[in-house]
Image (cartoon, rainbow, N blue to C red):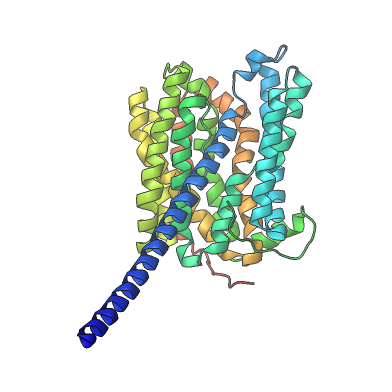
Amino acid sequence: MTQQKHESEITAHWLFKVCICVGCKLRLWVYHLVKAMFAHVVLSLILACLIKQQLLNFSIFISQRVDGLDSVGFGYLQTIFGVLQLVGGYIFGRFADQFGARAALILSCASGSCFFLLLSLSTNIPLLFLSRLPGVFMHGIPGAQKVITDVTTPSQRAGALGKLGFCFGVGIITVAPLFGTDFVAITVGAAKGCTSPSGSLFSIREILRLMKFPGVMEIFIVKVFAGFPIGLFMIMFSIISMDFFGLEAVESGYLMSYFGVLQMVVQGLVVGKLASRCSEMTLLRLSVFVFAGVGLGMALMRTVWHYCIIAAPLVFAFSMLATITDSILTKAVPSSDTGTMLGICASVQPLTRTVGPTIGGVLYKQFGVSSFGYLQLMVNLGLFVYLLKSKIPLEEMKSQ
């Protein structure tokens, strides 16, 4: 009797241990699952706010609220903001390298808060122009990309940037129906950030130094010119959507949500898988070639339904180009300079916004919507031939 009782106690003891171990493992698994879900939700919300910043920039309704602001003044407002973003992109990247990604994201969020505070107080033209000043540091997407480059290995980077773009698509779907006539195409909590020795936040010598690394200048040129024609189209889209497609503000918002769904699918399901199976140069050539096909489709489109069909390859090419070029460029420079490189990459869009209204306006007025498509076709066909014939030296830098 005593022996049976002793054996029962041993069995109960081991069962208790097994239950404790299983419970701890289950608790740990649930904890990591909830933590991962929370991180993705927070990141999606952050990126949703960032997209809201972009969608609210230069809303055409501002001109109706501020007395005395005509179309010429509205153009000046666009140009000033574009110049601020152009200069600020590089400075923000240097700041991220020197003080870490966490500090850079805090700076971006604080700048966004100042931007909207001043915008809410803008009852006259001087205050409206003053509200654009915080825009020099509103670069949250490069800040999030800096976090990704810090916590991933070079082989994982393209896929991780693709997942970041997936969260970005969630933000588009969340915000576009609420705010939407303007569409600005933009490539997508900080963990830890690498810092480098302090130095000047703006240095032309630093830019030239980075451009001298093997393959950096060539890839950067492809990045700038491949997306430039479609960038002109996107700048004029608020006008094109009303004049050419005949869309109302709500319908434009639904169209932006459609773009968000496409971006989620491409970034979440396509980019990562292709990046793991194909070389980055192959994917770069593919994106440029698809861009050329998109240009032909844009030249021939006549209705908004045609544009919805073209949107699928357009989002694929745009997402792939942005992800692959960012991945190549950040791997081609030392790890201590990835923030600066991302800042330079982030300056591409403001550069287009600075010169785009003038060029896009002339193209649209003189030659119509089809001119954007033909320009897209010619530029990307030339780049595709260049990528096929040239041997761009790509070297992966070790951590420094």
Of residues 373 and 194, the one drawn nearer to the viewer in this rendering: 194
With respect to residue 247, does 390 lie above or below?
Answer: below
Q: Is residue 224 visible?
A: yes
* Furthest residue toward bottom: 3
Query: Where is 316 relative to 333, above or below?
Result: above
76, above or below 326, in the image? above
Query: Which image quarter is the C terminus in?
Result: bottom right
Residue 11 versus residue 75: which sits nearer the camera? 11
The percent position of residue 167, horizontal first and vertical second, equals 46, 45
Of 72 and 183, the residue lying toward us: 183
The quadrant where residue 361 appears = top right
**Is 291 displayed left or right of 348 in the figure?**
left
Q: Whole-percent x and y of residue 238?
A: 52, 23
Q: Position of residue 367 (x, y in %)?
A: 50, 23
On the rendered structure, is 225 left or right of 319?
right
Q: Position of residue 36 (x, y in %)?
A: 45, 55
Who's the residue at 72% across and 58% down the image?
Answer: 99
Along the viewing direction, whichever of 17 and 394 lies nearer the viewer: 17
Residue that lies at the very extreme toward the front in this rendered image: 1
The reply, left or right, for residue 263 in relation to residue 237 is left
Q: Is residue 381 visible?
A: no
